[in-house]
């Protein structure tokens, strides 16, 4: 896509988007609510018209091509299954509309069901399925159309935490089974983005902030916004006198890149809260900054509210930013 804009009246939702997605890539659009990621997905699908710029698929400009003619299949947050049809008929519906032979429809549906472990459920109605199974049926309905491009719009947000983990694995496995199919996935959950993407596109206020592999964004964020958005818990930011030692306007350091010192650490303060999660602990320390600094510690923490704590960034594992929020290189 080149110089793509989307406007509703005078309001610009997407601003000068320039992006190339390679065939067979798994690309995730991520950003806070209202950043334009779903609108961009809908522009690609044809469900939204483009206000300016060009969108090409396989070298063909598709700005004015109908959604059904773009070779795209879309999976939504809501499963949108027909409640009166069984799984087989839900998956076969679009093929029947194409008047394909019954035997060809059966083969396509059964092949997709096999990929998604839905074979035992083909005769069930949607109401007899779990949330994860319904989402797999929605994905299967897209697979049978043999699309060149899959678009996923927050498909896991209606599922509980355990099911989300399971479905993340299943979508990643599906990508391995369909190596020539391009997948574009929208989420506000950066854990989904980090675990699934070949490349991540970070959006804010309709503008692309950075594009890169998950590790590129994690290790080399090109702005304060990306640094704070990618990673969980989010990066700690220190400015003013706390950043002066590092000759920066703002210093960013991740909780897992902080070492607790017996004394004489770079920073020190009072423990305000401690979370023991079993394998890890998160210690929240008030050093006088706007928000407490989060320190991650392996295993169980013995620190309690009111304890004094001294700590430092580990080696060179910190990020320096100038007053504009861009990385300081010197």
Image (cartoon, rainbow, N blue to C red):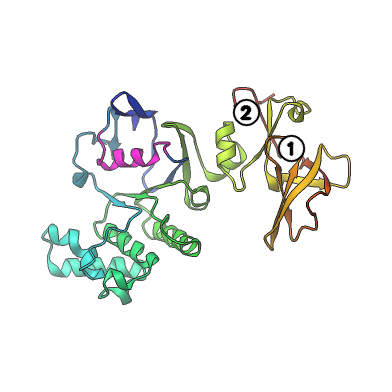
Q: Position of residue 33 (x, y in %)?
A: 44, 41
Question: Which of the 4 image quarters holds residue 216?
Answer: top right
Left of 245 or right of it: where is 212?
left
Pick the front one: 294 or 200: 294
Q: Is residue 278 magenta?
A: no
Magenta region: which residues? 34-49
Query: How far apart are the two marked residues, 1 and 2, measured between alpha carbons?
Result: 14 Å
Q: Secondary structure at mark 2?
A: loop
Q: Residue furthest right?
A: 263
Q: Name the quadrant of the N terminus.
A: top left
- Which residue is label 2 attached to? 327
* Residue 83 in the image: above or below residue 70: below
Q: Position of residue 122 (x, y in %)?
A: 27, 73
Q: Of marks 1 and 2, which one's residue comes earlier in the chain?
A: 1
Pick the front one: 148 or 266: 266
Left of 151 or right of it: where is 268?
right
Identify the residue at horizontal 24%, vertical 67% (top origin): 109
- Which residue is label 1 attached to? 316
Judge the density around disc 1: few (<14), some (14-19), many (≥20) Cα neighbours within 10 Å.
few
Q: Name the quadrant of the C terminus.
A: top right
Identify the residue at horizontal 25%, vertical 75% (top origin): 123
Identify the residue at horizontal 23%, vertical 34% (top origin): 63
């Amino acid at each position: 896509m080149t110089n793509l804009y989307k406007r509703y009246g005078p309001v610009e939702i997407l601003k000068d988007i320039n992006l190339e997605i390679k065939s067979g890539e798994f690309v995730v659009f991520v950003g806070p609510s209202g950043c334009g990621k779903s609108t961009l997905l809908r522009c690609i699908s044809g469900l939204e018209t483009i206000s300016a710029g060009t969108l090409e698929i396989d070298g063909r400009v598709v700005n004015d091509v109908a959604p059904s003619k773009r070779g795209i299949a879309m999976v939504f947050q809501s499963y949108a299954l027909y409640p009166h049809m069984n799984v087989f008929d839900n998956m076969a519906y679009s093929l029947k509309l194409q008047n394909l032979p019954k035997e060809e429809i059966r083969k396509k549906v059964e092949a997709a069901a096999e990929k998604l472990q839905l074979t035992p459920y083909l005769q069930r109605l949607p109401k007899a399925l779990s949330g994860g199974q319904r989402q797999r049926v929605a994905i299967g309905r897209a697979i049978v159309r043999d699309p060149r491009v899959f678009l996923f719009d927050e498909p896991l947000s209606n599922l509980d935490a355990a099911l989300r983990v399971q479905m993340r694995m299943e979508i990643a496995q599906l990508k391995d089974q369909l190596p020539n199919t391009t997948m574009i996935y929208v989420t506000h959950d950066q854990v989904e983005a980090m675990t699934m993407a070949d490349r991540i596109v970070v959006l804010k206020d309709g503008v692309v902030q950075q594009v890169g592999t998950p590790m590129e964004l994690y290790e080399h964020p090109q702005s304060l916004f990306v640094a704070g958005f990618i990673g969980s818990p989010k990066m700690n930011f220190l400015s003013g006198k706390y950043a002066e030692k590092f000759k920066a306007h703002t210093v960013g350091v991740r909780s897992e890149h902080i070492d607790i010192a017996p004394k004489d650490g770079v920073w020190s303060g009072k423990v305000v809260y401690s979370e023991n999660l079993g394998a890890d602990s998160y210690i929240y320390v008030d050093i006088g900054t706007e928000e407490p600094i989060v320190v991650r510690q392996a295993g169980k923490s013995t620190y309690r509210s009111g304890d004094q704590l001294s700590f430092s960034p580990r080696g060179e594992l910190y990020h320096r930013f100038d007053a504009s929020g861009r990385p300081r290189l010197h």
